[in-house]
Amino acid sequence: MRHRSLRLAGIGAVLVLGVTACDSDKLTTINQDPNNPTSAPPGPVFTNAARLAVTRWLGGGAMDLRGPEFTVQHLAEVQYPDEDAYRRLGPADTDGDFINAYSQELKNFQAVIDVGKADSQSLLWGPAAVMRSLVFSNITNVWGDVPYSDALQGDHGVIAPKYDAQKDIYTDLFAVLGDATNAMAAAPPTAPKLGAADPFYGGAPLAWQRFANSLRARLAMHLANVDPVTAQAQVQAAIAAPGGLFQSNADNARFPWPGDGIYDNPWMANFRTRDDHRLSNTLMNAMVPRNDPRVPVYAQPTEWDTTVSGGPLCATPPCYLGMPNALTQSGASAYFNISSRPGAVFYGATVYGCPTCGARTGAKFPSFVMTYAEVSFILAEAAERGWTTGSAAAFYQQGIQASMDQWGVTDAARIAAYLADTAIAYKGGTPGLRQIALQKWIALYTNGVEAWVEWRRTCVPETLVPGPDAIQSTVPRRYRYSIRDLSVNGDNVAAAIARQGPDAFSTRMYWDTNPTAAPTYPGPSCGTRP
């Protein structure tokens, strides 16, 4: 077998998170000056790319905590309501994430794929292909038409990649995920694995097959309105593929943070120095009146139990309250002590908001990339649409229970009471689809991009509209293109705009068209401030 190492793809492709190699020296060796490395083993490159991807798409920046989590109104801003009002989500603010997603995590995943395929090591390139697909799906779901087939080809002279239509990107992602699953399933037991270099599953092939198939089902459901025939076919293919979908929370794609002060949960790292986040009224109003057992995990009690005038803040303290989105700075500051911070699980003793949480409580809290709860809701919707066997009601309840378990809710009596609530008990038909969409939106807390996708697709919750100080009266359907790519790749960007529509927040991407096919849409006013 040949032994290979990878050219470092961008700054930061180094040994991280304590990983020093793959599970054997079968994969690669390095022969170079250790003080001036130009290449690295594929295992650590994979690990670092995974860290970069999770930090970007589930982290403290414009692609999650300071962007979609406000847009989708899981959270609101209490001190500096800029992103909450869409003021700091323009091209200059998101440019770095667009460019760096390609030059960092995608470039490194592609390098692992290339060497894995060259050596016919499917348990090396397969996981990298799944992660590459995840990142590309996030990029296209944020911007729409983006570089794909020509992307990552700079070493081969492609410096101005064309922008592919989102429909074509999805078609290829389905094929890539199917190929990766089949290749990993066919690998012999003795095939080299990523092992400890894989922070998600330790290189376990079956786990990666289930992740690939579950991601395929997620992407398929995105097409339910615009192309239900393809959506149904791809959901069914994902279910039937080797390994199937996630079977329990043990299958969750979760990134475990060391919590060593260097590699901490990125939400916790943000909260260490900022006290700008509160739960949104939109989320709390969907949870608190129904006595949702997840409330004390998602949120902290308000700092005050009384109003400024001395009256009770809620009927029975501790109080869990949200605040409106996109207020003026003075209006938002009035909620500083009377709205709930994100859950104590994200905080540590030295950060704002939770002095009794214990040292580095949130530093090791995992980031959830995809979960059994989400898969259960995908199956519930598929069953309700007649795309798969099984009971939509059973899958729906399974999704709620899985979300409770994921977040550590153990009070069986409270969970049972919640499921028995007449507003929560499954109704079926179009009302049932609304219930599935709402519960999925709640369960996707901390996964802002995917929650934003689901809201755009379903318009659930229907109460989600821009706040009074937002710079526009409609919820963004996408982000605007990179100013750097406009300057160096202008012709291809212009072609994408001509095909997709104006480079504006309001332009709908491919899967976000044909809203009349969505039984959950209340009409064209979805997401519009009265």
Image (cartoon, grey):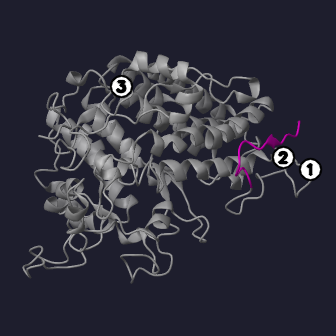
For the C terminus, give its image quadrant. Answer: top left
Is residue 123 visible from the viewing direction of this image? Answer: no
Badge 2 marks a residue whose secondary structure is loop
Label 2 with label 3: CB-CB less than 8 Å: no
Rounded to the nearest angstrom, the CA distance separating label 2 from label 1 is: 8 Å
Label 2 with label 1: CB-CB less than 8 Å: yes
Badge 3 marks a residue whose secondary structure is helix
Tag nearer the camera, 2 or 3: 2
Q: Which mark is residue 32?
A: 1
Of all residues shown, which one is farthest toward the front?
487
Mark 2 crowd level (few <14, some 14–19, many ≥20, 10 Å Cα): some
For the N terminus, give its image quadrant. Answer: top right
State the residue in front, 464 or 82. Answer: 82
Which residue is rendered at x = 60% and y = 66% of the image? 258
Residue 28 is situated, as x and y percent measured from the top left of the image, at 84, 45
The range drawn in magenta is 2-14
Going from N to C along the chain, the mark reached first, 1 or 3, is 1
Q: Is residue 420 left or right of residue 490?
A: left
